[in-house]
Image (tube, rainbow, N blue to C red):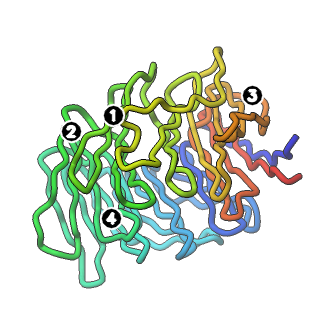
């Protein structure tokens, strides 16, 4: 049985990520808690809304109800990157070159070297993601996704599909874009020609997505098993059945995190249990027994040895699979 280093916090913890040997846990009140090499806590916002790790620059980027965009380093030091007074920062994204984008309402803003670029949409921006090379920015909203080249003045490409698109992610090779929708479904586009990919059949809304190390699989929450869609061929999952891993009849999957190097996925459940399951043969290993509340987020460290997990009830921690 792997060892678990617990971190018991008060209230809802919805975000988790790593900087080197330190795991960060973001609670709803706006405090970033650190466990590992630099254990401690830093109050970053009056209400935390969005969170993304930028390990190359050793910083956690966050946005909050206070309108601030903040970069926090591994030792807890904070730097304010922008401040939108009176606005709620709904989404944040980081490009490989360090470019930061964030959104409030209908506006997406990109912090470029020569200033801030503002992009207005017809509807509120719900989620943002940079393509793997960092040149393209996806902004999801009602009835689709807008693709921008922020460093140029070119017009956006709009990928349309009726409904609210709440979570956007590019495949690691940049060939596909997938969103989780307000309804219990995923929608995707093949970017070469805009072909649609429809992934349905979930009993609950999908709140967690994770690509496998080489982008051959996309794992998702929202069912009694982790639903893992195949993306090996040019048509992605179209016409193919997904894997259903870690099936449990009594607890819904609420969070997924694919291992950074191995073909396996960590699956977190509504009752707090975590399983590790291999893609090839569906073999399961227990990583954590049930806890106090549903898991909200999980993240592997760079080596793939430790998994940090967050929970609605605040019972968080780190699982070390090599102990």
Q: Which residue is mark 2?
A: 142
Q: Residue at x 32, y 60 (%)?
A: 102
From mark 4 to mark 3, how far is it between C-alphas? 37 Å
> Residue 121 location, x and y as percent?
15, 52
Q: Quadrant of the N terminus?
A: top right
Instruction: Estimate how packed mark 2 is, as few (under 14), some (14 to 19) or many (20 or more) residues with alpha carbons within 10 Å.
Output: some
> Residue 123 location, x and y as percent?
16, 44
- Whether pointer 1 and pointer 4 mark residues with C-beta atoms closer than 8 Å, the reply is no
Q: Which residue is mark 4?
A: 101
> Residue 285 location, x and y as percent?
78, 36
The answer to whether residue 32 is seen in the rendering is yes
From mark 1 to mark 3, how far is it between C-alphas? 28 Å
Q: Earlier in the sequence, mark 1 or mark 4?
A: 4
For numbered disc 2, what is the local secondary structure? strand
From mark 2 to mark 4, how far is it between C-alphas? 19 Å
For numbered disc 3, what is the local secondary structure? loop
The answer to whether residue 47 is seen in the rendering is no
Instruction: Estimate how packed mark 3 is, as few (under 14), some (14 to 19) or many (20 or more) residues with alpha carbons within 10 Å.
Output: some
Q: Residue at x 22, y 76 (%)?
A: 151
Q: Mark number for residue 181?
A: 1
From mark 1 to mark 4, how far is it between C-alphas? 21 Å
Report the number of numbered marks.
Answer: 4
Q: Which residue is mark 3?
A: 290
């Amino acid at each position: 049985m792997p060892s678990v280093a617990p971190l018991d916090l008060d209230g809802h913890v919805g975000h988790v990520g790593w900087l080197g040997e330190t795991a960060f846990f973001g609670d709803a009140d706006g405090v970033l808690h650190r466990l590992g090499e630099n254990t401690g806590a830093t109050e970053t916002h009056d209400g935390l809304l969005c969170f993304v790790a930028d390990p190359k620059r050793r910083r956690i980027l966050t946005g909050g109800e206070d309108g601030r965009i903040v970069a926090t380093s591994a030792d807890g030091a904070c730097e304010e990157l922008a401040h939108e007074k009176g606005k709620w920062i709904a989404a944040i994204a980081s490009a490989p070159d360090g470019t930061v984008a964030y959104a409030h309402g209908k506006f997406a803003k990109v912090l470029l070297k020569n200033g801030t670029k503002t992009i207005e949409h017809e509807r509120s921006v719900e989620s943002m993601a940079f393509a793997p090379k960092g040149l393209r920015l996806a902004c999801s909203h009602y009835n689709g996704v807008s693709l921008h080249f922020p460093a140029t003045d070119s017009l956006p490409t709009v990928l349309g599909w009726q409904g609210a698109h709440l979570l956007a992610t590019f495949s690691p090779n940049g060939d596909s874009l997938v969103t989780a929708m307000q309804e219990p479904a995923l929608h995707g586009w093949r970017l070469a020609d805009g072909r649609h990919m429809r992934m349905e059949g979930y009993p609950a809304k999908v709140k967690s997505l994770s690509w496998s190390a080489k982008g051959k699989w996309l794992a998702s929450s929202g069912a009694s098993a982790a639903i893992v869609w195949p993306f090996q061929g040019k048509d992605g999952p179209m016409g193919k059945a997904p894997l259903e891993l870690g099936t449990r009849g009594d607890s819904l999957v609420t969070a997924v995190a694919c291992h950074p190097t191995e073909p396996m996925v960590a699956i977190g459940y509504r009752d707090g249990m975590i399983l590790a399951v291999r893609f090839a043969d569906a073999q399961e290993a227990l990583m954590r027994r049930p806890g106090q509340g549903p898991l909200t987020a999980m993240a592997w460290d760079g080596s793939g040895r430790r998994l940090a997990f967050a929970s609605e009830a605040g019972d968080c921690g780190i699982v070390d699979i090599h102990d």
